[in-house]
Image (cartoon, rainbow, N blue to C red):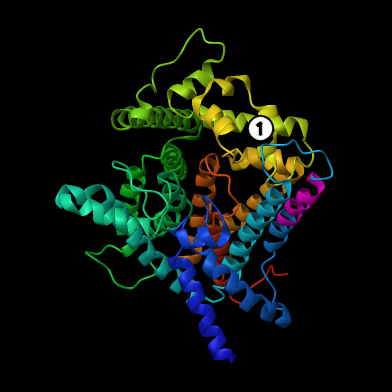
Amino acid sequence: MTKRVWQRTLEVLWALLVIALPFTSLPLVMKLTGSSSVAPASLLFVIPLVLLYFPVLLKKDQPLPFHVRPVLLFFLFALLTIPLAVLTPVPDFKQQSITRAGLEGAVTLGLGLLFYLAAVSLPNSVRRINLTLQLLNWTGLALVVYSILQVTLEMVIPSAKPGLNAFHALLSPTRLLEDRMQGFAAEPSWLAHMLNLVFLAYWLAATLNRTSAHRFRILRMSLENILLVLGVVALVGTLSRGGLAAFMLVLGFVFALLNIRLARWLSTRFGKGRRAVVTAVITLLLIVMYAIIALAGLWGLSRVDPRMEMVFQFTQGESNPLLEYAENLKFGERVIYWQTGWNIFNDHPLMGVGVGFSGFYFPQYLPDFGWQLSETRELLFHSDGLLNIKNLWTRLLAETGIIGFALFITFLVVFAITAVEMINSGRGMRRTLGFMGLFMLVALLVEQMSVDSFAMPYLWFSMGLVTAGWRWYLPVANNGGVNGQI
């Protein structure tokens, strides 16, 4: 294979990976992998990319960003927990195979690492990063338009729904819902997940920093400006409470940054003696305003989402009022799964029970309240599959212990420092990608409370792309080269 053909093949595979990002559970990939849920279409392209690119990369001894070190440390430790887990007696759970669970855990970890390595190394020039962002925009445009059509098309063309369902069946194992947008994803919450961690993070950053990957404008607006509006519409249309909460947290973060500037500017308009009082009053007013906006948002959501009808009704006199309240809002099972993960961690605090093995421990550590919930009983008594913690934070604690959790947080902190450095020392697209990294991290705090899979590519893709931007877009004060490599 000549160098030119090799490079062209890499570019095509990378472009196809970006285009495939919205597809979370492609039936073809599900058949090939035997997965029943998470089977991203981008998997079809990340493996050949790595097989083609990394042998040459290692042969050339081309340095990678230093950020790869903490990522590798986490993944290596997480993989180590799998063979260590089988050294201790693992509880039996129906006909589930411990060997299969360990292999699945290793594969999901490996896929997460492959997505990160591909995203951090394949966009290896300013031109390729810009092309990636352009392709991300066009992919995102198709995603949000298709999502909006899922709810609105039937209003315009009543006979279109069967055809839309037939088309969607080719792309996802689940049927379209009547009143919720889900894009090409298997679940509406997964659409919200990818929007928050990839698309909206970039579109909001580009809008705030007034940059674009394209030269054209539509009525003086960039494509990212338009996509941000459409993306928010699609996010609201998912009715994903976690996704909406994550985006509201990002908006709160943005407003906090803007209000800090406003408070500083206003305080300079007064004398030194009154500056502290004025700053305190402004801060208090802003907190009150945000509280009113949050309450108004909850009230509005309670009007359109039946699950939120009892959001302002608190149960009294129950033995466990918080769990009862969560059950009234139709996420009591999720809270129980999280608490189960925490209980497992309490008994295995150092290295956890091993990646992929927490499901074997569910009957032993399930809280008493969990046995009262119909979904939990159905899964335990009438399903052969292992239960999931459904929360990355408690899953990390339960399966990798405090060591794995600390390693994961370490590379998030390194990434956060990098994003802040890009904002402070960059301009143009470097600064935009820095904001994208921060927005993704803020959304991650909430998003990963409902998603626990390492095989989902969105976290790794965004972190890799932002790190690539740090590497190839030079800081304002440094025009002599790129530092910080290994």
Q: Nearer the viewer, residue 53 or 370?
A: 370
Above or below residue 486? Residue 367 is above
Q: Quadrant of the N terminus?
A: bottom right
Q: Main secondary structure of the magenta part?
A: helix
The quarter of the rendered structure image containing the C terminus is bottom right
Residue 136 figure quarter? bottom left
| The magenta segment | 75-85
Image: 147 above or below 329: below
Viewer can see residue 431: yes
| Point 47% across, 63% down: residue | 28
Q: Secondary structure at mark 1?
A: helix
User: For residue 136: magenta?
Assistant: no
What residue do we see at 35% from left, 58% from top?
Answer: 143
- Most distant residue in the bottom direction: 2
Q: Position of residue 96 (x, y in %)?
A: 67, 43
> Furthest-right residue in view?
87
Q: Nearer the viewer, residue 67 or 417?
A: 67
Q: Residue 27, how many percent across, how many down?
A: 46, 59
Residue that carries the numbered disc 1 in the rendered image: 362
Q: Is residue 476 visible?
A: no
Q: How many discs mark residues in the rendered view?
A: 1
